[in-house]
Amino acid sequence: MITFEDIMPIDILIVDDNRADIRLVQEILKKGKMIVNLHSVLDGMEAMEYLRKEGKYKDANYPDLILLDLNMPRKDGREVLEEIKSDDRLQTIPVIVMTISKAEEDILKSYKLHANAYIVKPIELNQFMNVVSSIEDFWLTIVKLPPNINKVETILNNKIETILNNKIETILINKVETILNNKVETIPKNDAETIPNNNVDI
């Protein structure tokens, strides 16, 4: 059975200062199997503003998945990862570190900070496309992602709206039935009693 949750788009936040990589990820996911809303920010400071719904991001949805680069201006990915995993409201969002760094120090630190996966970005285009497609196949198809706060609220609101609509419909039906019953009760039982007798005896 397909549920309301199953047909909702998956929100992905990509945090990367490389605009070309962002566009490429967007194009690959557009052709994928899942409906994806890809949101992007260019540095760690902006990423935290987005996740905390600050400023221009006050109406942003929490992402279902985060693709995080490490080496960025203002605030790097390591700091962002640490802040996400220290925040009760954000810590369950899966974070995939996706970076050009092959340094063991970065790999170890990312996992210590509870990254959910660490991927080294391939330089070759076809390999890059295969990596992004693999992320979609595994993380968006096989893996059961944790409940998204925004989607839970949307589902609850839809359920509440359905309940209210059903309740209103029931009230209206009962009201109409009551009006009809009252009208029926006011009609004389024997219509003949209300018709004057026009017969004349000869």
Image (cartoon, rainbow, N blue to C red):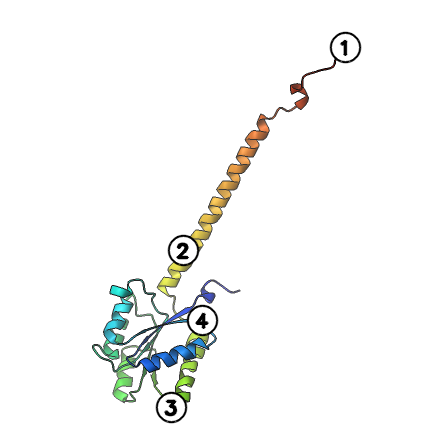
Q: Residue at x 44, y 55 (%)?
A: 159
Query: Between disc 1 and disc 4, whose residue precedes?
Result: 4
What is the C-alpha distance between the residues marked 3 and 1? 113 Å
Q: What residue is pinned by disc 1?
A: 201
Amino acid under disc 2: Asn
Answer with left or right where residue 174 lies relative to residue 100: right
Query: Between disc 4 and disc 3, whose residue precedes?
Result: 4
The front one of 28 and 144 is: 28
In the image, residue 101 lies at what x, y percent? Answer: 29, 87
In the image, residue 178 lies at what x, y percent? Answer: 53, 34
Q: What residue is pinned by disc 4?
A: 35
Which label was assigned to residue 124? 3
Q: Is residue 41 shown above or below 192?
A: below
Query: Between disc 2 and disc 3, whose residue precedes?
Result: 3
Answer with left or right where residue 47 lies relative to residue 185: left
Amino acid under disc 1: Asp
> For numbered disc 2, what is the local secondary structure?
helix
Report the mark closest to the observer, 3 or 1: 1
Which label was assigned to residue 112? none
Query: Between disc 1 and disc 2, whose residue precedes?
Result: 2
Q: What residue is pinned by disc 2?
A: 157
**Around disc 4, counting alpha carbons within 10 Å, would you say few (fewer than 14), some (14 to 19), or many (20 or more)?**
some
Report the mark closest to the observer, 2 or 4: 4
Amino acid under disc 4: Ile
